[in-house]
Amino acid sequence: MQYTIIQPSTEQQLNDYFQLRWEVLRKPFKRPRGSEQDEYDQVSEHCMLVDADQQAIGIGRLHFNSPEEAQIRFMAVKPDLQGEGHGVRIIQFLELKARDQGATRVIINSRDTTLGFYLKCGYELKEEADTVNNPMAEHQLVKYIDASNHIIYRPRWCHELQQTWQQQIPISDAMGIRIYQYTGRSLETRANLARNVNVHDTMFAGSIYSLATLTGWGMVQLQLQEKELDGAVVLAEGSIKYLKPLASEPRAVVYLEDLHGNMQVLRKHKNAHLNVDVTVYDEDTPVAYFNGRYVVKAQRP
């Protein structure tokens, strides 16, 4: 299913936007119609995630409390579609809006039920609520944003993975390979073209292969952590199909659905065998398709 983020502007889009806000965030608590809106709606940035039929499946809002502080509120995803990474996409969109408008920090209020999600997105507890005496109380979280922490989901894990590449695979640093974004369901890496250019002023075929290999490797490693599994990731076999030269912006992307295999055998101290498909782009144009067979070596009892 293809999903797109829009900023609702037509009457129908705004009706759908506020309807979903009420259904998810107000109706379950028996709050009346109209309680889903407030005085900040007129001066806020709104976003809505829609499916191919333009049906709203997720929403979020950003407003500024001061020139430096932005606040995300009214985050909601349809209950039957939660857990599929849609909330991360909305957070990413709103954080980029905050960054572009000069915010240095973003705050979010969260109940216990959503606290874990925001912590995974790199937010830190600023004020912890007394949810023992008041289960509906909200914690306040904050994320300080700058050029170094643009990764939306699991930023600490991505930082650790980047350090592993730099320390254990020095060529990745020489090539300028960097983790650009991780959402839990996709990983994108980028490379510095100037460090990988051949006599034709395009990217070395070997550099494209290395970028794809590390991207697949990184996705496997991050998914191991998501599943709380341990093991050493190695590439057993790789193949690549080159479509055209890469002359501008090297990007490699892998999606969760491109990873095939059973990681759970690691719990039985058996090696996991995984196939991963990675696409390499020049800006938005596919230039290579890579398939890697990775082995995760299990820890022995």
Image (cartoon, rainbow, N blue to C red):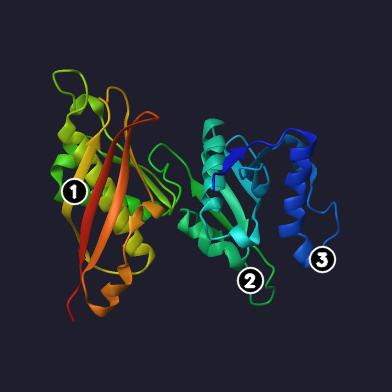
Q: Which residue is mark 2?
A: 130
Q: Is residue 77 left or right of residue 251?
A: right
Q: Is residue 176 left or right of residue 146?
A: left
CA distance separating discs 1 and 2: 52 Å
Q: Residue 211 location, x and y as percent?
A: 24, 40
Kind of residue sitting beneath label 2: Asp
Which callout, 3 or 1, points to the residue nearer the camera? 1
Q: Residue 187 location, x and y as percent?
A: 37, 47
Q: Is residue 46 left or right of residue 266?
A: right
Residue farthest top in this picture: 200
Q: Residue at position x 25%, y 38% from top?
A: 177
> Can residue 139 be seen from the camera position used here?
no
Q: Earlier in the sequence, mark 3 or mark 1?
A: 3
Q: Which residue is mark 3?
A: 30
Above or below, 139 against 279 in this view is below
Asked if the residues shown at circle 2 and circle 3 are in contact, with their CB atoms under 8 angstroms apart, the answer is no
In this view, the residue in front, 122 or 230, is: 230
Location of residue 248 (image quadrant): top left
Q: Residue 202 location, x and y as percent?
A: 22, 22
**Element on which disc 1 rests:** strand
Q: Residue at position x 82%, y 54% from top?
A: 35
Are there few (<14), some (14-19), or many (20+) residues within 10 Å of tag 3? few
Q: Earlier in the sequence, mark 1 or mark 2?
A: 2
Q: Residue at position x 22%, y 35% from top?
A: 208
Residue farthest bottom in this picture: 301
> Can residue 147 be seen from the camera position used here?
yes
Kind of residue sitting beneath label 1: Gly
Q: Which residue is mark 1?
A: 238
CA distance separating discs 2 and 3: 23 Å
Kind of residue sitting beneath label 3: Lys
Q: Residue at position x 31%, y 48% from top?
A: 277
CA distance separating discs 3 and 1: 55 Å
